[in-house]
Amino acid sequence: MKRGLLLLLVILFAGAWLGEKMVQDPGYVLLSYSGTTVETSLWVLLVVGLVSFLLTHLLLRLLSKARIPTTELRHWGERRARRSAHRKTLKGLQAFAEGSWWKAQRYLSQAAPRAELPLVNYLTAAQAAQEQGDAKAADELLERARRQDPQNTTAVDLAQAQLQFERDQFEDCHTTLSALYARAPKHSQVLRLLHHCLMRQNDWQALAALIPDLRQNKVLPDESIQALELRCYREMLGTSLAQLPAETEHENRVQALNRAWQDLPARLTSDENLVCDYVAQLVTLGEEARAEIFLRDQIKRGWSENLVRIYGRLRGENAHKQLEVARKWQKDHPDSADLLLTLGRLSMRNEHWGKAIDYFEQSIALQASADAYGELCRLLQHLGEHDKVATLLQEGLSATGAGLPNLPMPDKAAPISA
């Protein structure tokens, strides 16, 4: 009762105020269109407008209650909006294909709410924003795409990771991809992008753990998988000592290196590159005796000219035994120039100068190499065979420098000029 009385008072007060205003100044409005002129007061125009609005509202309410085709009107409006969104989407995709990034972003983002596939619009618009260097706009578009379909965010998160990778935000990219990998461990694009991200982060341990999934889902060719696996373990073996504190004791360093070797897959422990890396690490630690024993065992398992050459450079615990081991190999490999070079070096360790000269000369006869010529010349120089050294140097230059271009040479008597 009180509310009704209060409302009535407000209406009476407003009516009195409007009546006074209408008397004071009725106003003047002139409407002209195509030769037709309408003149009226301002207040009459306002009243006509208000009555028209109320009548239209009432008519629409009646139509709605009578179930007369207002739904058809709504459907017509929706179809019109969809057609407009379709046209803008096509314009946006065309602009994207042409590299018109600003147009593509504008058309695609405008059409996205009414588009048939709004996710495609948002993702493409985000990429267009990224191409313009507008990371903030790209992230906002991706967030809108995520809100569009909260139950299916794999595509959005993958696009987010791709943009983060392109911005060199590898930590953020790794975080995004790790969550994706947990949800979709067999998604090839997730695996491929995670592989690239870990490569850029030099996270070889995580990358090695990812290799089984890369292989099982055929994300990379078999040859690339094998090369990647080898590189991972070579990097891990190579950094096994670098990761230790500077004050780490020698024996602990050796144990850390051995653990890194033992952690290798069994099929890779015979790989020549890894064997060479492990031996080089042992030599760096001053463990040539251990390296000699290890390398001797590797050569017994599988002959390798390169490993045999390295074997001759190692100072084993027993030089005589090391030489005898190499002599036994000669029975099965009499025509190995690298083995003869190694035998020459091991003979020098045992101070068998004459045998060393014979081995070096045989190695050169089979395959002239700079190492064999260098060792022979060095030995003869210390033995006082200077003339023979000069002859060998000339022979070695001719043999090892065969690939040098044919250039003019100065006359012996010509003065040296700049």
Image (tube, rainbow, N blue to C red):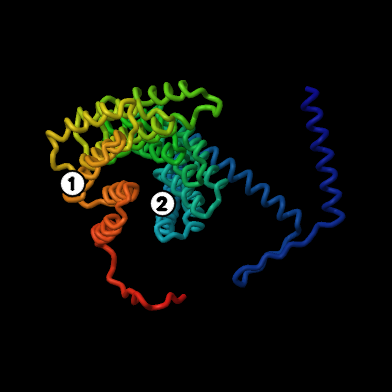
Type of residue at label 1?
Gln
Type of residue at label 2?
His
Q: Residue 254 versus residue 91: which sits nearer the camera?
A: 254
Number of numbered discs: 2
Q: Residues within 10 Å of mark 2 (few under 14, many from 20)?
A: some
Residue at image coords 51%, 57% = 102
Residue at image coords 78%, 22% = 1
Between discs 2 and 1, the one toward the N terminus: 2
**Residue tagged by mark 2?**
86
Residue 362's spot in the image, x, y percent? Answer: 18, 46
**Residue 86 sits above or below residue 293 on the image:** below
Residue at image coords 81%, 35% = 10
Residue at disc 2, secondary structure: helix
Residue 362 shows which numbered tag?
1
Q: Quarter of the image holding residue 158?
A: top left
Q: Residue 90 versus residue 40: which sits nearer the camera?
A: 90
